[in-house]
Image (tube, rainbow, N blue to C red):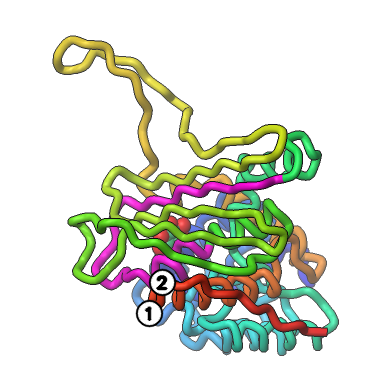
């Protein structure tokens, strides 16, 4: 292992591009050595900006001599093959969600990692590194609010294209709340139900937006998730944990609250809502990447792993079925022992 971790980044769309920038300018101990993207022009531009080289084949990038670790930010359908290639080579990988596109293949990855005898796969559930989520986790574990009974999650996006249907709202958006619930509560999710209120006029026909998703955990904690991906205002993610002896509420964006004289001469008070997840979670991504770089330099990971990716895939598959059937759908997790 060279002193500096040489990273290949696969996929340099919005997320991968941001990771390249974060690794190059805001974290230490790593440098982006290789860039891969199906869009060669984009790959060349991103690589040139950080002094990396372009590799046209993702598997060649993973197996290159000048690569010690990999960040996968390619489309979800490519993840299984790319993660397995990292495991075959025995190098650490940070994989953006989803781990794979279905629970069966996600479980195969968990098993393949077990066979290496090491933990090499970290999942990009960055909210675990956000200071407010980390503080809530500490508070819960300290027993300051007592046994947790309820978790309420609000998850709103400003806008999304017509391709972003109700199933995608589960697999691409609610998946974060799945991980948040598992992380904060330390319990698996046992069932999923989805309620469909009146849809916004901004939603395409037959897309249920917003939805209320309800998880019941193994110990009967109820988690409510409002998922609303065409809310028009901005990116709003807030959470309230309710315990027997107290509660904690976070994600209120209450920084920079400004008072000014409004058009009618009246006083107006308010702040701004972040437009997207990059702005909202930039700090969490940076902390996540620094943890991953530090761990990868010694050949490991430091964060959510392959099992968390599998559990999320299993809950999302149940969630998609719940959208379709309107029923309470149980979640079954296979054992890997
Ligand atoms: C996106 O992929 C994310 O991860 C965001 O957090 C989520 O709000 C958005 O809906 C997804 O498309």
Residue under numbered circle 1? 40
Residue 320, percent from left and from top: 45, 75
Earlier-in-chain disc, 2 versus 1: 1
Q: Is residue 170 left or right of residue 232?
A: right
Which residue is at 55% across, 80% downward?
100
Decide whether residue 205 is among the magenta residues. Answer: no
Which residue is at 61% across, 75% downward?
331
In the picture, the disc for residue 326 is 2
Give the total number of marks visible in the rendering.
2
Nearer the camera: disc 2 or disc 1: 2
Q: In this view, does 230 lie to the left or right of 193?
A: left
- Give the residue at the far front of this rendering: 327
Q: Does the residue labelled 1 lie within 8 Å of ligand 1?
A: no
Q: In which quarter of the image is the N terminus?
A: bottom right
Real-space CA distance between mark 2 and mark 1, rounded to the nearest whole angstrom: 43 Å
On screen, 110 above or below 268? below
Magenta extent:
148-175
Residue 82 position by quadrant: bottom right
Residue 236, percent from left and from top: 41, 45
């Amino acid at each position: 292992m060279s002193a500096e971790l040489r990273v290949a980044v696969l996929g340099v769309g919005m997320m991968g591009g941001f990771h390249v920038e974060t690794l190059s300018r805001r974290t230490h101990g790593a440098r982006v050595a290789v860039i891969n993207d199906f869009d060669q022009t984009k790959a060349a531009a991103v690589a040139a900006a950080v002094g990396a080289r372009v590799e046209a084949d993702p598997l060649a990038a993973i197996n290159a001599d000048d690569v010690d670790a990999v960040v996968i930010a390619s489309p979800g359908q490519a993840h299984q093959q790319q993660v397995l290639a990292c495991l075959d080579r025995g190098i650490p990988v940070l994989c953006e969600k989803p781990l794979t596109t279905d629970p069966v293949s996600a479980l195969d990855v968990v098993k393949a990692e077990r066979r290496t005898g090491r933990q090499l796969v970290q999942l990009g559930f960055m909210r675990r590194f956000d200071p407010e989520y980390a503080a809530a986790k500490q508070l819960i574990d300290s027993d300051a609010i007592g046994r947790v009974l309820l978790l309420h999650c609000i998850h709103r996006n400003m806008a999304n294209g017509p391709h972003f249907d109700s199933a995608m709202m589960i697999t691409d958006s609610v998946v974060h709340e799945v991980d948040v619930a598992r992380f904060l509560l330390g319990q698996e999710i046992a069932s999923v139900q989805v309620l469909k209120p009146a849809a916004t006029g901004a939603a395409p026909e037959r897309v249920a937006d917003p939805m209320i998703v309800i998880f019941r955990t193994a110990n009967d904690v109820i988690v409510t998730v409002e998922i609303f991906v065409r809310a028009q205002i901005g990116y709003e993610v807030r959470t309230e944990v309710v315990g027997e002896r107290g509660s904690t509420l976070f994600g209120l964006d209450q920084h920079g609250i400004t008072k000014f004289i409004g058009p009618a001469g009246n006083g107006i008070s308010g702040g701004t809502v972040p437009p997207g997840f990059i702005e909202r979670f930039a700090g969490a991504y940076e902390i996540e990447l620094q943890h991953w770089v530090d761990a990868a330099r010694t050949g490991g990971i430091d964060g959510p792993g392959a099992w968390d990716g599998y559990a999320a895939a299993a809950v999302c598959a149940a969630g998609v079925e719940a959208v379709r059937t309107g029923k309470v759908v149980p979640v079954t997790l296979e054992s890997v022992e």
